[in-house]
Image (tube, rainbow, N blue to C red):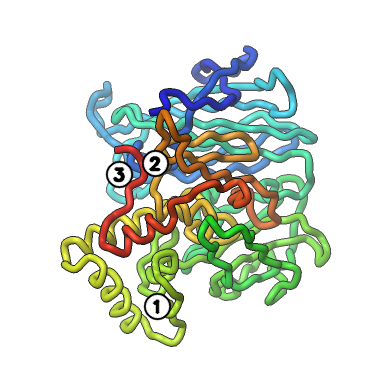
Amino acid sequence: MIKELRLIILLVSGSILYSCSTRKMSLHFQNLDKIYDPYSTSIHPDIQIYNDSDSSSLVVIKIKSQELLYNLANEENKLLSKIRVSYTLYDPSKKEAFIDSLSASFRFEKSQIQNYHLINLSVPTTLGRNYIIELRISDQNRRSSINFIRQINRIENYTARDFLISNPVNNDYHTDNYIREGQRFSFSHYNHDIDSMYVFYYKNNFITPKPPYITDTISESFSIADTVFTCYADSIDYSCFNNEGIYFFSSSMSTHNGFYLYNFGNNFPEFKKPSDLIKPLSYLSIDDSIVSDTLDEKMIKLELDNFWLSRAKNMDRSRELIKVFYSRVKYANYYFTSYKPGWQTDRGMIYIIYGSPDYILKTINEEQWIYNPSDIWPGNVFVFENIQHKFSRNHYVLNRLKQKSTGWDDAVKLWNSGEVYYYQNQ
């Protein structure tokens, strides 16, 4: 087994509670294999970053109450959770890139009516620079943590992070880019008054990627919107956003700068409707006839049940296959959603079929996923390149020309024989 896989990544060695640091960055090697493993942590927060002034950005963290551990180990004798948030900020364009770090603790009392907790952190950023921020969020009562790495672009004007999206009812900032039925939103720019914006709507007709051994790369065109309409900031007509797809907000008809919201269904990143649940099965099905737009939900449910039962041969095994497969679909949507649902991206495809990698090597512009390496074999390696996209900061494309082996056919064959495909060393 390969004992050490190395990647140079810039990280600071420590931070000071509620204070900034002026130390230099240290360089060391780190494997990031757990960043896409949902079972390595008990918390799965949503993160959003807004530029809220010319000299600062706002990190908004949303943590589900049900994922936190509350206890009475405190002077107040109340059921409290204890959260610690640390960040390291650096400039990737410079050799000694460290800029700032901070660590802060937060306590929240358990509530029967509050489903989540919000944390807002101000980070020093200035116009004309790019930044990388590494976040570490910890549930100290449970001793569980999760890491995030995000880019903050402050070179261009009118980027998506310059627009603040919030709930007009309670003024909480949104921590994702999703539109859901019954959830209101409002928008503003931190430095400019906005009366209205043009909205370019693109239907949810995204292409599902082909198996990784096929060298053709998917190219989806967004040159012509399906619909264009005007959205007024003080009187948003939410019925205009009922259809699934991309909604791109721009200050003019010709600009490429603005922000985007996605409608991928009310339960996203989970799938509950049979018509949604059946779509990822295209990775396992020999042909696409199983996914039919002509069937109603009841008929699709029957097709779905028959698909799994025909492979598992019994109900218990079928339930196990369904549990694992759709858990991977859910977390593919959570981790990898770009301008299209995460399950339809290259990373989502690999994640659903193979599971979480043994090793992940990450730079600013690239991720390498390594499965099942040994002393005599480097394993199956998938290289994903970060591509700038008008509608996403999280768009990665598989470099198919670098694929030497994939094991795809064996993996699909195993799923179709009623076995869960676990590639990661257990």
User: From the viewer's perspective, is 305 left or right of 120?
Assistant: left
Contact (Cβ within 8 Å) of mark 1 with mark 3: no
Image coordinates for residue 111, horizontal then vertical, percent:
30, 44
Residue at disc 1, secondary structure? helix
Is residue 269 among the parts visible in the rendering? yes
Please say if 375 is above or below 382.
above
Q: Earlier in the sequence, mark 1 or mark 3?
A: 3
Residue that mark 1 sits on? 290
Which is more toward the observer, 68 or 28? Answer: 28
- Quadrant assignment for the N terminus: top left
Residue that mark 3 sits on? 111
Disc 3 residue type (three-letter): Ser
Task: Check disc 3: other Cα within 10 Å, few if <14, some if 14-19, many if 20+.
Answer: few
Disc 2 residue type (three-letter): Asp
Question: Which mark is in front, 1 or 3?
Answer: 1
Q: Earlier in the sequence, mark 3 or mark 2?
A: 2
Residue that mark 2 sits on? 37
Please say if 154 is above or below 353.
above
Is residue 229 among the parts visible in the rendering? no
The residue that appears at 70% across and 49% down in the rendered structure is 388
Image coordinates for residue 381, horizontal then vertical, percent:
51, 42
The image quadrant that residue 9 belongs to is top right
Q: CA distance from mark 3 to mark 2?
A: 28 Å
The image quadrant that residue 307 belongs to is bottom left
